[in-house]
Each structure stands twice: as structure tokens, then as C-alpha cells.
Amino acid sequence: MKKIILGIVGTVLTLAAITSCKKLDLAPYNSVSPETGFQTWLDARYWDNGLYTQLRGRLYGSYNTLQETAVDQLNASLDFGNRGGAAHRWGNFLQANDVAGPYQGFYSAIANANFVIEGLDKIAVPATAAQQDTLTNAKSDARAVRAYYYHELMTRYAKAYNPATAATDLGVPLLIKYDVKALPSRANSKAVYDQILADITYAKANNKRANRSASSSATAVSAKFTPDALLALEARVRLAIQDWPGAYAAANTLISSGRYPLYTTEATLKNYWHTETARSEDIFRINATTAETVNTNAIYLGYSGQNQWYVPDFIPTQSVVDSYEATDFRRNIYFAQLPIFIQGVRYNNVWLVNKFPGVPSLFTGTFTNYMHSPKVFRIGEIYTIAAEAAERGGSTAANALTALNALRVARGLTTIAPVGAALTQAVRDERTREMNFDGFRLWDLKRWGLGFTRGTPQNTAFVNTGTGFTGLVIQANDNKFTWGIPTNDLQLNTNLVPNPGW
């Protein structure tokens, strides 16, 4: 952890600098003191804005695509330049430093959240109710983002949660105080998730924002945590720890509220993804602007504007394209048949991932910059959580089918009525179709205890076919489903224990 901690002070300074010019008036001018940086409710607002700026930088991009390249649904093109190649090929090709970025990014953000949590407690209660709400919301947000980051760390760097062994399974280092000298060991998985749930409980109790009403405009989307967004986070977390009743209750509460209706036509669903002019399925998104840029999922297209062809790093397998029925609205939204130019050869009508083509209103030039406002929580995911949690025992099989079929019908499919193992498979298949390329597939396989075989390529002429590429087979017990603790952190903090196989 020492390497990460050495960068914390600089990160905190950056966080302060981007939130308000007011911080330039503080002394000393090259640091932020808890005594001078946290004085009024306005300071709380500035720090709160900074927390969201940091969250924006930890969504999409490599925080999403790194795990997507690792699984069964993509083939590396011959021109992919080894971007994401280590994760894609597994085995000895994949080393801990190849997956170090999220570890360092999340821990630096946690350090700042801890700094803000401690600082906000120094601010006296403001005079007006509105000012008090600003301070209270900032306190809620700091714990919400800390819970989010710790869940993301556990998903990547700890084994899948098992309630029977969680009290002894290695989790990740648990830091809830800002301490630049700390060299923590790894907490057990239960302790980390207990802290995550405690932070969510605190955040829910102190969040003063209003949820969107069921009758509000589809463009009325919160760009900050609301009670509903916190409930979505809770549903995701409880699914991860196999709290099936808790996950179902949280998810079903959001569904039953009627505030986030599913789109039921291809046109509206396409606007939701491609132009962002339709937003009713969003529970919480971080808004992007041309001035406030975000990470992009640009590896799937590689558009060459002048030539009007594409040079993608990764190409969807024929298997994943074929997993969508012809009537499934998502097929022609998540994918598009486009011309590609690989190794000097043009190929027409190749299916490419088109879920993130770039929003035209966010372009800063003639051609796409692939920018989208990151969807942190959306109702489509919540339906998949309700279905899985109910099917696993959090409610009845009938309720699992209700959630499953509601999502299927909204996406242009017919209702089904599987039972037993067939219902389990149907729930998993529908989650995969809904959540493809959003960064969940690897973690779902890990949570389900499943391995995979990489799908059949569309054409072997334009993808890599060597070791670790097409036909890759990964067993369910492969150590590298759980990513390695970065090498530098292990060397600088001897209290850390590496994950097996790294």
C-alpha cells in the first residue's frame, strides 16, 4: 500500500483544486489543512463536487474494458496492438501489474474519501436547513463512494464471497482513516463487506435528496447519489454476498416504485444508449460534457473517419451475436454490421460492438470521441438482480419469472416458464445479454463458479488465433479469476499476502 499512499497528498490537492478557486486562498498554498479546508457548508459542497469528479474518473475505460477483454465474448483483432492482451490471454501472459490500475485508482479515491469524512465532521452545523442538507449529503456521499470503491476492489482482488468461509477468506486492506503511514494487512472478506454495508446504511440514513417521481420527465436523472441509487448499490452488494432476500428486497423496491420504466421499443432503447436523449432507465449516471470529459470504451470500433471503415481492437464472437434472438431489440443496438480494415484487407458486414459509439452532442470534432455519460446504476441491471436473487431463494420461483419475463418482454422477447436448472440458466443468460460489455461478465462467471470457453470467431482471417486467443478454455477454479495484488504494493508493504497463482 505504500506506493499508493505516497500519492495521496497530491491527489487530495488535485481534488481540492478542481472544486473551487476558494481553496487558492488557503494557507499554506501547497497543501490542504483539515483545520482550514473544512470550515463552512460551502467547503462541504466543494469537497462533495470533488468526490464526484474522482468517481467520474473511475468509471468506464479500463475500469470496464479490462475485464471484458478477459472473457469469452470477444476476439482480439490482428491490429489490436496488444491493448488488453495480457488479460485476454490469461496464464503466464497475465501478471499482477497488468491489473494494478484499478487497485491503485480505487485506493487513492478511498484515501480521499477518508480525508473528506474526517474533515466534514469538523464543520459546525450550518444555520439554515438547506445548508444543513448540503453538509449532510456530502457526508452521505463520502461514505457511498467509499462503499462503492471497496465493493469494486473486493470483486476484483478477493475470491468470490462465500458466507461459510468469509470470516477467514482474504479480502482487501481495509482503511477507514486517513493515514499516510499505514501499512495494513488484508482484512477478511466479511469484515470488508460489513464495512461496505455499514457505509451504505449511514449513507441511506443521511441522504436528503429526493428521488425522481414516477411521472417526471425521462430526462430528469440524478447525477448524484439519491436514496434510490443507494438502494441500487445495496442490491448489487447483497447479490455479491449471497444475501438473496436482501438483494431481492432492494431490487424489487426499485422495480415496484415505477420511477424507472423499462423501454419497450427498439427506437427508445437505441436513444437511451446512442444519443442519451432517453433516460428513464437511469437510476444514477455521471453526466459527461465537452468540458468534463470521461473515460471511454473506445476499443470496440476504432472508426477511421476519412476512410469510413473501422479498425477495432476487439471483435465480438459469432457466439455472442447469435445469443440474441432476431427480435431482441438489443441485438441491433449493442452490435452493428460494419466494414473493417485489418492488416491491409477490407472486410464488409462484420459485427462490431456498438454499445458505446459516442454521443453526437459530446463530440468535440467531426468524428466520434466515444464519450458517453457513464451509467452507474440502471434499472435493467436491477431486474437481473431481482430475478437471480429470487431464483436463488430470496423469494419464489414465480417472482424470479416475473422479473425475468418483464425484462425479456421489454426487450422484444416472449415470456418463458423454465423450472429448476433451466430457470437458473435462463436467468444467467438474460443477465448476460442485458449487461454485456458493461464490465460484469467476468465477475458474474466468478460469482457463479463457472469457467468458460472463448466463443467461435466470426472469421479467423482477421483475429488472432494463437495461444490464449481463439478457443481459450478457462476452468472455474483458475486462480486468475481473482486478480493479483500489485507487485509494488507487496514489496513495499510486507504485511500484505499475495493471491494464489500470482
Image: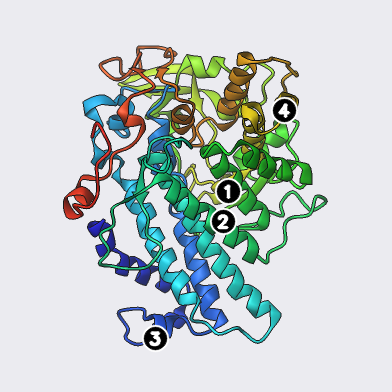
Give above or below for 477 relative to 220: above
Q: Name the residue under label 4.
A: 396
Sequence-wise first label, 4 or 1: 1
Residue 81: percent from the left, percent from the top?
28, 31
Residue sitting nearer the eye, 307 or 445: 445
**Whole-Å distance between the Cαs marked 4 and 2?**
26 Å
In the image, what residue occupies the spot 36% across and 55% down? 107
As helix, strand or loop, the secondary structure at mark 4 comes to loop
Give above or below for 75 relative to 229: above
Marks 1, 3: nearer the viewer: 1
Residue 282: percent from the left, percent from the top?
65, 46
The circle drawn on residue 200 is 2
Q: Name the residue under label 1.
A: 233
Marks 4, 1: nearer the viewer: 4
Marks 2, 1: nearer the viewer: 2
In the image, what residue occupies the spot 51% across and 79% down? 43
Q: Is residue 302 visible?
A: no
Q: Is residue 493 visible?
A: yes
**Whole-Å distance between the Cαs marked 2 and 3?**
33 Å
Residues at marks 2 and 3 touching, judged by CB atoms closer than 8 Å: no
Residue sitting at the far right: 215
**Whole-Å distance between the Cαs marked 2 and 1?**
8 Å
